[in-house]
Image: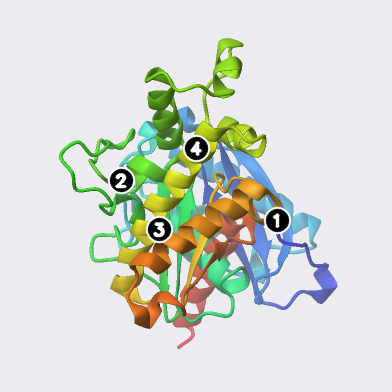
Amino acid sequence: MPSERIPRDQAVAPFFVGVDVGGTNIKIGVVDDNGGTLAQTATPTDEELGAEAAMQRSRDAIVGLLAELGLTFDDVAAVGLGTPGSMDIPKGLILEPPNMPSWRYFPLRDCLSELCGKPVGFANDANAAAYGEYWVGSGRKCNSMVMITLGTGVGGGIILDGVSLDGAHSFGSELGHIIVDSSLDARLCVWGGGQGQLEAYASAPAVAARAADLLAAGRTSSLTRRIVQGEGLSSLMLFEEAEQGDELAREVIVETARMLGVGIVSVVHAVDPEAIILGGAMNFGGHDTATGRMFLDRVREEFQSRAYHVVRDSVTIDYAMLGGDAGYIGAAGIGRTLHQHSQL
């Protein structure tokens, strides 16, 4: 669910800007000191035009948002930037985003900082989304939480005592790459080829691939009718058919929940958070649908059947609240943290 907008006269200064870079669009929001969104917009990523051009468009969009609010960059304390792919956070570099080849090894943080004339906090996009949920979303009552994002890939963010876990190589919280199946014939991730990784079982392409394998083996399903009519098999199609009672679709979704629960056990045993928050586009309708509720219940059951008793009944597992706003809100929050540290 998107976050509610707050009126300018109810906002608490200082203000922060969050920039959430995606493969198709860049989401940008102006956020107050309490994490409330004053205004939000998006601009095309246009990956092929390069990173510098995208940062210039982002800067122009920020100027437009601020003007709508009667603000200027003088009212902004800091900017936060979240991007996909590998990065070198201390150096401010985006390294090798898999679907953005024109952006490789670019000093993205410093480019945006120079364009805006403001300090820029830099984070992985999933870490930024996790920070947003920690700050004002489903994890707002927690000191420590983990967010797992399910979509084209499986991302993760770990917040421990209010600090985003970036790691020594800016690779911290890459939960999609934890091993959940060590067998020799474990599935391969459709993106990086990693065998037995969570992303090979719980990403949207992986879910569709498992369903395709079952259909190829001769299983019957209402999915076949839609595929014959020219639709591409997807996790959304599985969700829609599961809602109508299709056995194969429900089976794949339940198995996805099981593997996710296995992964969550390892994460909880490693970092002992108060909550696990599930975000991303692939939530099977969340709390609002029977399939979404079934998925969450199965994740919880698998976790409770495997977790050590100290954490088994005390860790909350639930869906995220902020939807697509989590990224820019969390990026703004990381910019806010940078500003607070500069004041010490």
Mark 1 or mark 2: which comes first in sequence? Answer: 1
Q: Which residue occupies the foreground of this view, 305 or 75? A: 305
**Crowding near the residue tagged with mark 1, few <14, some 14–19, many ≥20 C-alpha atoms within 10 Å:** few
Picture coordinates of residue 242, whole percent (x, y): 60, 37
Measured Cα–Cα span from mark 1 to mark 4? 20 Å
Q: Disc 1 residue type?
A: Pro
**Which quadrant, please, contains the N terminus?**
bottom right
Mark 4 or mark 2: which comes first in sequence? Answer: 4
Labelled disc at residue 2: 1
Mark 1 or mark 4: which comes first in sequence? Answer: 1
- Report the number of discs: 4
Q: Disc 2 residue type?
A: Leu
Mark 4 or mark 3: which comes first in sequence? Answer: 4
Labelled disc at residue 261: 3
Measured Cα–Cα span from mark 1 to mark 3? 26 Å
**Foreground label between 1 and 4:** 1
- On the question of residue 132 being in view, the answer is yes
Q: Which residue occupies the foreground of this view, 228 or 74? A: 228
In the image: residue 301, left or right of residue 213: right
**Foreground label between 4 and 2:** 4
* Residue at the bottom extreme, as displayed: 344
Measured Cα–Cα span from mark 3 to mark 2? 31 Å
Picture coordinates of residue 167, whole percent (x, y): 28, 66
Labelled disc at residue 23: 4
Residue with the mark numbered 2: 95
**Crowding near the residue tagged with mark 2, few <14, some 14–19, many ≥20 C-alpha atoms within 10 Å:** many
Q: Secondary structure at mark 2?
A: loop
Picture coordinates of residue 52, whole percent (x, y): 46, 41
**Crowding near the residue tagged with mark 3, few <14, some 14–19, many ≥20 C-alpha atoms within 10 Å:** many
Q: Disc 3 residue type?
A: Gly
